[in-house]
Image: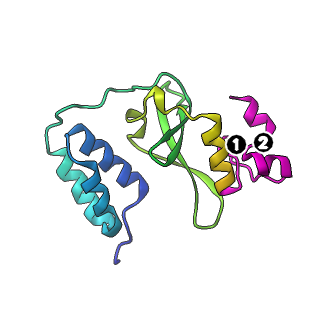
Amino acid sequence: MVNGTATEPQKNLIRLLATERGLDLQTIEAGFEDMTKAIASDFIKFLKGITATSPAQRVQIVEAGFYKLDKKYFEVRESKAGRLYAVEIFKNKYGKVVAEFAPGVVRLLKPENLLTLDEAKAFGKETGSCCICRRELTKQDSIDAGIGPVCAARF
């Protein structure tokens, strides 16, 4: 594609705007595969022009922490200004687990999306890195468990 595929932050914002406007997310998600950055940008402008039928609340979650929404993992942090925001935790193309700002996602998360210990372990087993601290799991006990003992104690 000439200008690359749509970025995850663009897709997250599209998801949020579509949800607020009562649009079918399944149909929109299907279009992500071939969506370029330019098309995503235009689609965001279009969605912003539609009146929201059920605007997401400012913040629906109660606290900073780790969450799972659909098949994606997020950490919610508090900014210096006291506002909550989300970062997506994922394995990048170089095999390193990273956290990338996920605009608008914090408004989609709910308390029932709080990450369970089993979900954190599944992430670690899948990626070879801890979901909580994002360090590579090196000790066999931690590799087998999918999480290190210090981070497991946080649950």
Q: Is 35 placed above or below 74 here? A: below
Quarter containing the N terminus:
bottom left
Q: Residue at x 20, y 40 (%)?
A: 22
Q: Which residue is mark 2?
A: 148
Q: Could you say where residue 34 lies in the image, as x and y percent from the top left?
A: 32, 70
* 14 with respect to 76 (left or right): left
* 6 with respect to 76 (left or right): left
Which region shows up in magenta? 127-155
Of 36 and 138, nearer the camera is 138
Q: Is 95 placed above or below 71 here? A: below
Dot 2: element: loop
> Foreground mark, 1 or 2?
2
Determine which quarter of the picture holds residue 21: top left
- Name the mark on residue 39: none
- Name the mark on residue 133: 1
Any part of residue 63 in sight = yes
Dot 1: element: loop
Residue kind at label 2, given as amino acid type: Gly
Residue kind at label 1, given as amino acid type: Cys
Marked residue nearer the N-terminal end (1 or 2) = 1
